[in-house]
Amino acid sequence: MFSKILIANRGEIACRVMATARQMGIATVAVYSEADAQARHVSLADEAILIGPAPARDSYLNSARIIAAAKDVGAEAIHPGYGFLSENAGFAEAVTKAGLAFIGPPAKAIQAMGAKDAAKVLIRKAGVPVVPGYEGEAQDDATLTKAAAKIGYPVLIKAVMGGGGRGMRRVERAEDLSEALASARREAQSAFGDAAVLIEKYLTRPRHIEVQVFADTHGQVVHLYERDCSLQRRHQKVIEEAPAPGLTDATRKRMTDAAIAAAKAIDYVGAGTIEFIAEADNLDNFYFMEMNTRLQVEHPVTEMVTGLDLVEWQLRVAAGEKLPRAQNQIELCGHAIEARICAEDPARDFRPETGPILDWQVPQGPGLRLDAGIVEGSEIGSHYDSLLGKLIASGADRHEAVTRLTAALQATRLAGIASNLDLLARASAHADFRAGRIDTGFIADHAAELLAPTPLDDTAWAILALGEQLHLTTNDPSPWAASDNWRLGGPVPLEWHFEIGGEDHTVLLQTRPDGWLCEAQHLRLISRDEHALTVEIAGAQVTAHLHADGGTRWLQIGADRWRVRALGTFGRPPVRKDLGGARTSVVAAPMPGRIVAVQAALGDAVAPGQIVLRLEAMKMEHNLAADIAGKVAAILVSPGDQVVEGAELLRIDADPMVAT
């Protein structure tokens, strides 16, 4: 067995690999970019090496620096994690040529499955059913347009070297294909260094089911059963579970047999996942989609239902050992489900979030597990993907596992950045999800229920106002330092102004000898610390957690979370209207990122909602649209420019003929 390994990754997967290595007595080496100097994976490693600046292409994708770092510290092997270089055949080959062990499959297996088009051809020859589509070498628009018409709409564009939903676009109509191809190619080139795409038939109500396989260098290939990854948004997995709801034993046998046949067809070694797709109402008819030649993000659910450590298996196989168990020794027990907690704002079209982690508390207990790459104080930047961590729950059956997950998600505290916690909690609690009525369109189909903002009730507003008042109170006992509006004859109410969702809200809070009066509600402070308030309101005690970041307030009461802008006691300054009636709209950067396309020219007439710019951030491409009708008055950026959050990118002069 190895005595020291280097983990060529970051975030939660680097922390996860280190945990198993530590249990096995293996020393670990972390690599980090300049942006990750204070990251959790750096502090957990026995050694850490700086490999370059923040952009991934200069650090985590720089194979030469990573291999040199491993050799410099005497590491015997490199674990690639997932993403970055994990499915790069050239990297795997370079590692072995450098005299190091690659904790993953051989380069030839990665190459065979890395290109999705070639993989489908190979798997079809092995007798495994494949989704109908086009996997040809010709990549010109005319060929792809003809292929899409032959397949029949809707179709799915997929990056040949892709994964994680990047470089993937669903196209409903022929007239939308050209723009979708251009966008998918840009994203694929940026994420994987290859713009090639393939086209598949899009199943209207698909289930995404994958089989975990493992193989050693002694000819043994086994499966560790299946996972259901159907809950997705924009082709990115959100909630995964094992085993797949509603899958019969007979279909499971056919699917796992097909997965093993696929692994054997390429002489596979190590951990791999064979991904299948099936119609939700007929799981017996399933098709091969792709193979991921690495450890998957969702591997913990397989560990929970088999009792096995997949990273330990990876290390043992890479060291030349036989698989620890034969197929008849691998049992499926109970149910497990995982939720991916991401730094993104569902209320703003899942826009990635950046900023500091002010609060991060996740429940612990029987049947719960957290794999995370953050701690309180971590800074979330724009250079890498938005995954913060994974909350996993297990139980004797699916009902118990889902119930545990829902309760844990509702109790999780996260402040400083917006997240998808509310979406995850609502999805896992939804009646259709609990009944197993799921497909990849579940979130989109239930968007009105899952994505609706949580309204603030009178109690929440009162606690926000009280938090503001307590924050302003000093330890100076003199009346001149008071902030309670005291005056002869008694204090008058303070008006606290807030903004949420573009709407202003005013709360009147009056100090009284026995507490405070807020909109006819009596408040009495029970206890407080720096960020927690326990208040008695109308005879009931309520505990709230409140954090401040500049003018932003993060409030959580029970399972309800809000981000509110505090406007102080005077509210917004008056808006000065231009007497001439002219108005200019500014398209600004919603987050730090790189401009990948400018889709309007100076003087162009644009309509509200028309895409004028495309911004790449956190490995995804984001559309920026005009919000008024008018003409483009100024273009302040060019493709390739790096921009900061809030930067002005483009200006539009309003059309005076259109009411705004």
Image: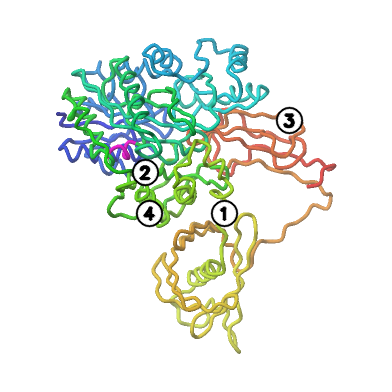
Residue 397, placed above or below residue 128: below
- Along the polypeptide, which appears first: circle 2 or circle 1? 2
Answer few, some or many: residues within 10 Å of disc 1's Cα (few below 14, many 20 plus, some between 14 and 19).
Answer: some
Q: Main secondary structure of the magenta part?
A: helix
Q: Would you say residue 597 is visible in this rendering?
A: yes
Q: Which residue is mark 2?
A: 337
Q: Which of these two is toward me, 94 or 108?
A: 108
Q: How is the image coloured?
A: rainbow
Q: Which residue is mark 1?
A: 453
Expressed as whole percent of the image width and height from the top left, the position of residue 556 reads: 46, 60
* Magenta span of residues: 299-303
Q: Is residue 218 magenta?
A: no
Give me the C-alpha separation between circle 1 and circle 3: 37 Å
The outermost residue toward the bottom is 489
Q: Amino acid at mark 4?
A: Ala
Name the mark on residue 72. Answer: none
| Residue 84 left/right relative to 656 | left
Q: Which residue is mark 3?
A: 602
In which quadrant of the rendered view does residue 71 lie?
A: top left
